[in-house]
Amino acid sequence: MKVTILGSGTAVPVPDRFPAGVLVVTEGERDQVVAVDLGPGVLRRIAQAGYGADRVDAVLFTHYHTDHTADLAALLFALRNPALAQRPTLRLIGHAGLAELLDHLTAAWPWLRPRGYSLEVEEIGPGGFTLDTLRVDAVPIRHTAQSLAYRLTDARGASVAISGDADVCEGLADVARGVDLFICEAAFPDGNYTEGHLTPSLAGAAASEAGATRLCLTHFYPECSGHDLLAQAAQTFDGDVVLAEDLLTFDLGTSTRG
């Protein structure tokens, strides 16, 4: 399993950090390509990671704020290109509200409707399901009424958990229990807690409670600039901590964790 940070930023534009997105690829005769969130510009990052729009098999949405969904329109428009149309079914997966979002998009821009391929919209609640060889577990998270975090586990047991936007809640430790990599938001530095989000030490505490092997902090607002976020996370988590950068890739290899 390879996991790439597509966007480590937020809705506030900065030159080197696009808004939210993560790419999870399981390798095989045909790589399975799953995106988690599609913030504005993230479709370009997918191309920079080596995959065309037609190679995205599924998109999981953590919630429906614009900095996590804006490139859904870009993806659907790209797939109107006849050269990309002959592709497997595209699955869009998220909490209740996804079908309504898609209806609004296609009402405003009718040309986003699929042409030459099938689109499946799946509204889910908490629980587990499969995406080909991936096991996916969705866990409710405190941010919006529709917020879900995801844990993805491949056939060999390698696992990644992705918090999406989150505030302190039991779901963080639940989704990241024993994972190889926990990608967790740390939107604001310690001392600048903002409701609906985490700080590095709060993310570290969740990773510690979960027993995660590695913590990757992400979703940085400009207020994080100039702060030692790694040191703040290390106050509550004694494992490996890294700061997300756009296109940073983790190879989770052949983990035996379940």
Image (cartoon, rainbow, N blue to C red):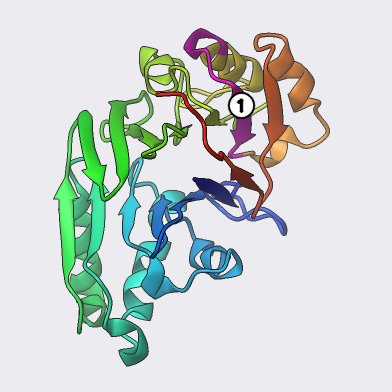
> Taking the image as drawn, is residue 74 in sight?
no
- How dense is the environment of label 1, judged by Cα within 10 Å: few (below 14), some, or many (20 and up)? many
Q: Quadrant of residue 44?
A: bottom right
Q: Please say whether residue 213 is one of the residues in the magenta stretch.
A: yes
Is 206 situated above or below 4? above
Residue 101: horizontal and vertical position, in percent? Answer: 23, 56
Give the residues drawn in magenta, as a range: 208-219
Residue 99: horizontal and vertical position, in percent? Answer: 16, 55
Residue displayed at 42% across by 61% down: 31
Q: Secondary structure at mark 1?
A: strand
Q: Nearer the viewer, residue 26 or 248?
A: 26
Left or right: 121 as drawn, with respect to 194: left
Left or right: 32 as drawn, with respect to 137: right
Residue displayed at 50% across by 69% down: 51
> Taking the image as drawn, is residue 129 in sight?
yes
Residue displayed at 66% across by 49% down: 248
Q: Would you name the residue on which mark 1 appears?
A: 215
Number of numbered discs present? 1
Residue 61: horizontal and vertical position, in percent? Answer: 34, 46
Residue 33: horizontal and vertical position, in percent? Answer: 40, 58
Inspect the image, locate mark 1, and give the three-letter code of the amino acid beneath it.
Leu
Is 146 situated above or below 35? above
Left or right: 15 as drawn, with respect to 108: right
Q: Quadrant of residue 139?
A: top left
